[in-house]
Amino acid sequence: CSASAPCCLELFALRFVKKHKQTSMAGSVQESMPEIDPLGFLKILPMFILTLLVPRVIGLFAARYIYKNGATILYDKQLGSLAEEEGWVFLAAVVFGFVVSWVNNYPMFYKGMVMRFNSGNLRANMMIYKAVGSDEKAPHVVLE
C-alpha cells in the first residue's frame, strides 16, 4: 500500500460496512444498533495473523532444536519406519490445528468493528446486548 492509494484491506472493510449498512427507520431495531467502525477490521488483523503464526513458528523451532540436539539417528530411524501414508495423518493434524485457530479467532474481526479496544476483553463477551426503548421501567434488550 502506498500513501496515495488506500490499502486493499481498508477498501474491503469499507465495502463490507457499506454492504451491511441499512437505512434506519423510526422505531426500527437498526436505529438502536451501535455505530460500526470500518477500520476495526484492520485493527484486529495484526493480532489475528500473530495468533495464527506465532504458536506454529515456536513449535517448528522447538522441533528443529530437539531434532538437531537430540538423538538424530534414532529420530531418522523412527521416521524411516513410518508407512508412506502416515505422513498425511500428521499433515492433517497440522491443518486441523490451523483451522481450529482460524474458527476461534475469526469472529474477532466483526467484534472489533462493534466494540472498541478500550471495551476490555473482547473474547469474554460472546454476545452483544443493548437496551432498546426510552421507557426505563421496562426496557427491551436485543441481541446485536
Image: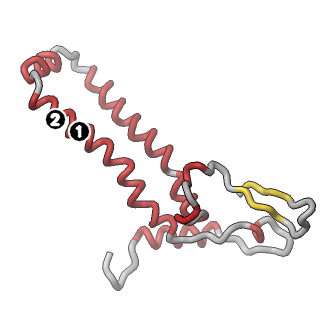
- Vertical placement of residue 129 versus 89, above or below: below
Residue 139 at x, y percent in the picture: 87, 61
Colouring scheme applied when the structure was drawn: secondary structure
**Residue drawn at the location 57% of the way across and 58% of the way down:** 111
Identify whether 108 is placed above or below 12: above
Mark 2 touching mark 1, by CB under 8 A? Answer: yes
Amino acid identity at mark 1: Leu
> Residue visible at 31% across and 47% down?
54
Q: Is residue 126 above or below residue 113?
A: above
Q: How many numbered dots are placed on residues in this image? A: 2
Q: Position of residue 22 (x, y in %)?
A: 70, 71
Task: State how far apart marks 2 and 1 are (Cα).
Answer: 6 Å
**Quarter holding residue 77:** top left
Given residues 79 and 124, the one toward you in this image is 124
Quadrant of residue 18 in the image? bottom right
Q: What residue is drawn where x is 50% and y is 51%?
A: 106
Is disc 2 surrounded by few (<14), some (14 to 19) or many (20+) residues within 10 Å?
Answer: few
Q: Quadrant of the N terminus?
A: bottom left
Residue 60, numbered label: 1
Say which element carries label 1: helix
Q: Quadrant of the C terminus?
A: bottom right
Q: Nearer the viewer, residue 11 or 121?
A: 121
Q: Residue furthest bottom?
A: 4
Helix, strand, or loop for circle 2? Answer: helix
The residue to which callout 2 is attached is 64
Provide residue 67's location: percent of width, then percent of height.
14, 29
Please state which amino acid type lies under the numbered disc 2. Answer: Arg
**Disc 1: CA contacts within 10 A as few (<14), some (14-19) or many (>=20):** few
> In the figure, is residue 52 to the left or right of 104?
left
Percent of width and height locating residue 69: 9, 30
